[in-house]
Amino acid sequence: MAQLTADRLLDGLSDAERGRAARVEAVLPALRDAAAGADAEGRFPVEHVARMRDAGLLGLVVPEEYGGLGGTLRDLAAATFAMGTACGSTALAYFFHNTSASRGLLPLEAIRAGLFEPDEVPVVRAFAEKVLTRMAGGVWLANFASESVKSAGANISISTTATKVDGGWLLNGEKSFGCATGVADYYLTTARLDGTDTAAGLATFFVPRDAAGVGERPTWDALGMRATANQGITLKDVFIADDEALTLPGAFVRMLQVSRGSFVGNQLAISAVYLGAAQSAYDAALAATTGKAFADTGRPVASSPMHQVLFGDMTERLETAYLWIRRQLELETSEPPLRGKDDVFRQWRMAKGSITEACFDVAVGALKCTGTSGTANSGVIARAVRDTAMSLVMTFPAERGRLEAANLVTTGAENALFANVASTTTTTGKDR
């Protein structure tokens, strides 16, 4: 049986999972070949969109009944990990495309759970199925929730507003740091209905990339993941028709109730991107130091005491990341669930920081192992250092996650991630 990159992350892949992972494996060489150039130019390789579309990967986590591949969080984590070993930027952008599926899967799950009234079901179902069928049909969706505005009580605050007009809505606001700006076919955009200040007023809109009033923020000169088209968008009186939105009051909150962890429910897969980058740095350092010998002894550079210490530390940190991510994956995919939602959420708040800190440590260790030769910006190791450094702050830093975990343990604090800036009321959900 052929070895797949996914096998390094997951044990016991089923035949169906192996088939989906093989599709990912087939695009890795092209992603790897383009990685250095894309990083140097700070440009998302748009040719990757066609590659993934042709491979069916834009519908990886869409159920087969809607035309997708029927994958789960296990498949998504395996895919982003594998892509992360080739090109972290592409892996990250691909992750955020797949988070859009939650806007389809969670509403359908909430319907099955009886959380919507009979007269509400057709509206909710129509929107959910539109999300899923578009993804399965090869449409790239950019998931835009994050904003520059900050709130003391939430990780993400929503100030973008939707105002009702005849036949639809006008959107106004700014979305920061959303992958695939100018690349995605639609920006799946979270906004609050004008006049609301609680989670009940949060709504979701399909915003066409070339719609009138849609602009791009200045190009972001990032420390890491430079080729994600991550600058974000501006919205100025952008008209969205009623049938391209889910504006039912309270739909957001009811959808959240059926998620296993956070609103997206698949954030673990973003950490898999960084684990893939760390693994590639480790492999590069090992190849460089075992393939080069000391001139006086003829022994591999890797045999020196210093390198032995570095590889011992790197191996421990790499295995630490694998252990955390595999445990979180087990908690979020096991059937029946092994733990309640609060426990799963608390575990994730700790896991994310532990995984990403360990990945950064591996990348830095690889840099130390290879010395100045590893600092070339076009190289795997230098990119991994920059890319994994980004992981320390993306979504939330380890310190915030551990603080929230402590609060959950000691005070039973609620999962408060989203807030409307019109009020100090905190709400739930998380995209980035």
Image (cartoon, rainbow, N blue to C red):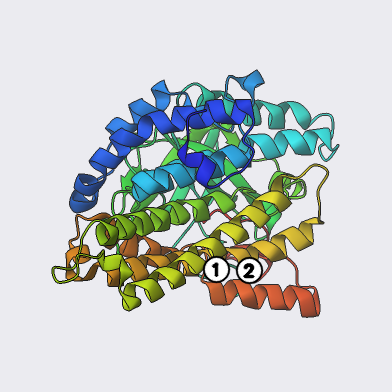
Query: Mark 2 and mark 1: span between their CA atoms?
Result: 6 Å
Q: Amino acid at mark 1?
A: Gly
Residue 196 lies left or right of residue 355; in this view the side is: right
Dot 2: element:
helix
Q: Callout 2 environment at 10 Å: few (<14), some (14 to 19), or many (20+)?
A: many
Which quarter of the figure has residue 220? Answer: bottom left
Q: Which residue is mark 2?
A: 350
Q: Which residue is mark 1?
A: 353
Which quarter of the figure has residue 348? Answer: bottom right
Q: Residue at x 36, y 70 (%)?
A: 365
Dot 1: element:
helix
Q: Residue at x 18, y 70 (%)?
A: 372
Q: Callout 1 environment at 10 Å: few (<14), some (14 to 19), or many (20+)?
A: many
Residue 386 lies left or right of residue 81; in this view the side is: left
In front: 252, or 386? 386
Labels 2 & 1 near each other (Cβ < 8 A): yes
Q: Which mark is residue 423?
A: none
**Residue 167 in view here:** no
